[in-house]
Structure formats: structure tokens, C-alpha cells
Amino acid sequence: MSSKLDHSKLTPAGVLITMGIIFGDIGTSPLYVIKAIVGEKEISELLVYGGVSCVFWTLTIITTIKYVILALNADNKGEGGIFALYARLRKYKSKWIIYPAIIGCATLISDGFITPPISISSAVEGLQLINPDIQTVPIVLVILLSLFIAQQFGTAKIGSAFGPIMLVWFGMMAFFGVMEISKHPEILAAINPLYAIQLITNYPEGIWLLGAVFLCTTGAEALYSDLGHCGKANIRFSWGFVKTALLLSYFGQSAYVMQFQGKLLPDVSPFYALMPDWFLPAGIIIATGATIIASQALITGTFTMVNEAMKLRLWPRLKVEFPSQLKGQIYIPAINWLLLAGCTIVVLIFRQSSNMEAAYGLAITVDMLMTTTLLSFLIFTRFKSWLPVIFFALVFYTIEGTFFLSNANKFTHGGWFAFLIAISLFLIMYALHKAGKIRKKHVEFEKVENYLPIISKLKDDKTIPLKSTHLVYLSRSSRQDLVETNIIHSMIRSTPKRAGVYWFLHVDILDEPFGLYYEVNALSEGCHYVKLKLGFKEPHKINLMFRQVVSEMMEKKSVTDKNIHPSLSGFDIPADFKFIITNSRLTVDTFLHPFDQFFIRIYRILKLWSVSITEDFGLEEADVEVETVPITIHAKEKLKLQPWTPSQKS
């Protein structure tokens, strides 16, 4: 089943699947948002009405207008998210746009370490209403462990149940919200934005309350990132129902809280307080199921984002598995266990959802600001005018900047954890980006035509041992007329390598998410340049793709399909292949700037933890040779080296 193809159009099934995939994070926010706003403060009309008014307008302006209406139009061939946006914009050759992309990715993933613990903890803590002495931390840890263990088996079989479960979840929230609002319909007056303005301006330290309000929209960025799974039509249609259910729950909880006006809110979850006692066990089960689905969506989204970063050369190469036939579903073991470790640490450090609320949301505000930055640039490229850019940026930088400031006081209360992870992830991605630029700067290319006569004679030189029938060099050159010096060094200058056919193979990652293309150019008889073009979401099955291209050329008799080793040439034995990978290594780091040296060292450490390019490209280990070719960076000034003379003896 292809989620990308089958569910991109508006259909009842597409809407149902969308609710199970897209809205898990934002859909479970009612478990803790109102409780976080009220906290341990005395209940007042200004606090409650102002708080729920802020929630209403945040969901309207940020989630609905920015993401559901505007951001979903900023897709890249149907794919969304900050990397899809970056891939769409990098053709404009603006060097700075890489930084919002990697900052946004780092902060989105870092806050993801808190999303499963806070969601599942909020649901499971409902058990304390039935048994006040129950310990919820072990239960949360068992659920998290089971969830992450299950990732390696895929979710194709149980994924079909996500939509119906979330439909029940949203329906349940809406029902109990309506029941409570019917008792106190005056709460609907909080839709008036004046209540939100009064909370910020008149309530003591009211601006800091926006840190709790912001929790209602933390899933908006994930909504944009998951665009490719369901399509904008299904997301927009289902958002109308989801937003209504969310608001009914928020307003219903606020109506319940108002009965304690002049007092402190008892140690009770406003969300569960709307349910009758007889329904509470069922409500807890449904809520726990919804939070597990929300966590599953976040984990899947993290796998997708890291995979995109790897394709864009912004993340170390990691092993990627495909646990099911569902298109786009991947499993990255290293990231899975890293997320489990991070989520476990969060649960053990903070223990209760109320403590996690203090750490949640700070990093995600940075991610939203980065998305706003890239969207502003996209608007400029589309309209070629600064007026719409200024209007868009002024509105959303002001709102999201205010949210960032209101969340700033969370840093010492746990926000440091998310920022520590974000900074670590940023350094990883920036180091790879920076090292790539340094290496690219020092990779030298030469004209292929200067070496074609040598290659032609090399093919016929019987004094040189035959390396392979087909000798394939993986090339960094995106042009058929250029080849890097490393390859010439390996082929001719180091140890001459004779072959029947020489290939220069270049892999190009496209700015679009999907698509597999190739180009073949004959440089001379027995020497060819092949360029494979892959969408940035396509798996790297380079060995399979290349051999398919060669097979087509063999059918056309463009290249030999016979093994040319003399002892085997008379038998029906297929032609053999040998892939050569040349790894360049800087030999004189002392001539690099210290800043560059630092990131080269980080790059080398990361490379030790990465899978080999052989595994990443799906090549057969037995058919691959890896050579290290030195790159010498010369000093900027010549040494004053003089000949020794006898008169200089002491």
C-alpha cells in the first residue's frame, strides 16, 4: 500500500488514515495544556478565559493559517517538512539557507525526545484517579520499551487501526467537551481575542503563561513534515474536524476549571475530570492508545527526517531497513535505540508529566522560527517583492518570537535537556556540511579528454595484470568532461589498472523527493560516464540501478557481456565487475584554519560510527575495493630551504 500515491487525493479512507498519522502529537495536547496553564495559580476569570482564548487563537493563527493553509502549499512534489523546503530552495544557491534547515531539524528531533514521555505519562497518570498509590513511571517505561522494540517489525498490520482509534479519541474529546460546555455556555465568550490580550497585558507575568499555551500547537511542525504521507486535501479536510474536537475539549476543561474560581485547582487532571467515574477506565485506555499512536507517528517522522538528512549528506550514513511493504516506512536501528535511551532518561529525570511540561516546547519554537525563515524566502522567490515577505515575517516572527521568549524561562526547569540534544545534533550536521565543503574545496578535477589516449593504451597493455572486465570508479564529478585527480591517481599513477571497460559512476541527489533517472555518455570506446539521479527520499540501491543500466547497454551491444579474462573467455561466464572507491584524506591539517581542523576531526569521528559507502550504496562487499588517496594542502609560503655547504660546518 502506498500512502503517498493512494491517499494523496481527498477520500474517506484518506481522511481516516490522516487522523491516524498526522494529528497524533497535536491531538493529544488536551491531556496537559489546560492543566499547564492553570498550574498552581489561583483560579480567576482572567486566567481561565484568557488562557483558553490564547489557545483558540494560537490554533487558528499558527496551526491553521501558517501550517494548514500556507505551509502545505510550500510542498516539494507533494512532500513537506523543513528538508523538503530546503531542497526546494537550494537551487537558488543561497548559502545561508542550510543553517535554518539543520537548526530546524535538530530542534524538532530534540523536542521529540520529550513528546512520547509527556504524552504517555499524561494518559497513564489517569490511573491515579482510580488508585492514588499506583506508580506510573514503571508502566510508562514498559510502554515505551514495547513501542521501540516493535519498530523493527514495522507497523503495516496495526497501522490500519490507527485511524479508527484516533477517530474514537477525537469523538470522545468532543463529546465530553460539549457536555461540560452545555452546563457553562458562557465559556464560549473566551473566543473574543480581547481576553487573550488582557491575559498577556494585565495578568501578573502573563506573558510567561504563553509557554504553557504554546503546548497546544507543538505538533504543527510534524503536521507539515508528514504531508507526503496523506496529501494536503486530506489534511485540510480532517483538520476541520480535529480542530473542532480539540477546541471543544479545551473549552470544556476551562468550563470545569471555572467552578474553582478563587481557589487552587485540586490535584486532578481537567481532561479526565470531564468523564463520569464509570467511563474513566475506558477513557484511560483510549487516551493511552492515542498517545502511543502519537508517539509512533513521531518515531516514524524522526526516521524519515534522519533518512532525508542522510540523502542530503547532512547526517552520518546509518543502516536503514524496510520492515514492511508499506511505501516510505523505514526503520533506522541506531536512531530507534537513541530515541529509546533519550525517552527513558526523560521519564527517569522528570517522572511526572507536570514536570515534563516545564521542559517541553522551548526547542520547538526555534524550529518554527526556522520554518518561518525559509517560508519567507520562498515567498520572495515567488512574488519577487519584499512587501508580502515583510507582512508574513512580521506577523509570524512577532508571534513565534513572543512564544520563544515566554518559553525561555523553561531552560533552567528542563529546557536545557532539549537544547543540549539540539546543540549536539546541530554540531553533527554542521560538521558534516562543513567537512564536505572543505573536502570539495580541495578535490581537484582534470579534463577527461587528456587521459583518454592513456586509458585506451592501458586497456591493451598485456604487461599489466587484468583487474576486471568492468572497472567502475565512483566519481564525485557531476560533469562528464571532468574526473577527480584521485581517480587518475588510482587508475594510472599509483598502480595502473587494466580493464575491458572503464566506468565513471556519479550519484546525484535531486531536489525532488522521488524519481530514479540515469544518463549514459560514451567518452571513448570502452570508457563511459554514468550519472544516476535519485530523489532525496529514494533508497540507495546503486548496485542494482547501475547493473540495470549496464544490462540495457549489453542488450544493445554497446558494451561486452562476456568475461574477458583469457582463461574464461571461451566459457559462458558473465562479465565480472569491480567497484573502486577512492577516499581522499587531508595529510597536512596544520595548514587548515583551526576552526576547519575541529570540524574535520568531528567528521572523522562520525565516519567511524557510520556505515560504509559500500553498504550505503547497496554494493556487494566482495566486488568493492577502497583506496585512500592523500590530498596535500601546501603551505601559503615557501620554506627558506638552502643547500648545505662545507663552510657552514661549526
Image (spheres, rainbow, N blue to C red):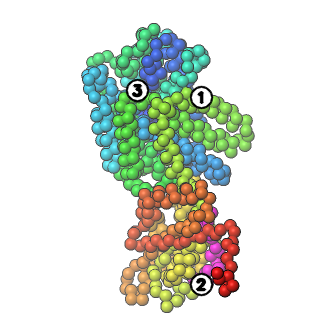
Q: Residue 126, how many percent across, how many down?
A: 32, 24
Q: Earlier in the sequence, mark 1 or mark 3?
A: 3
**Which disc number belongs to residue 402?**
1
- The question of residue 640 being in magenta is answered with no
In the picture of the structure, the residue carrying the numbered disc 2 is 454
Q: Residue 582, how many percent across, how many down?
A: 51, 70
Tag count: 3
Q: Residue 149, how many percent across, how many down?
A: 31, 45
Mark 2 packing: few (<14 Cα in 10 Å), some, or many (20+)? few
Horizontal side of 155 relative to 86 (left or right) equals left
Q: Is residue 187 above or below residue 553?
A: above
- Residue type at numbered disc 2: Ile
Q: Is residue 89 above or below residue 141?
A: below
Task: Name the residue nearer the viewer: 331 or 643.
Answer: 643
Alpha carbons under labels 1 and 3: distance apart: 22 Å
**Which disc number belongs to residue 354?**
3
**Residue 433 visible:** yes
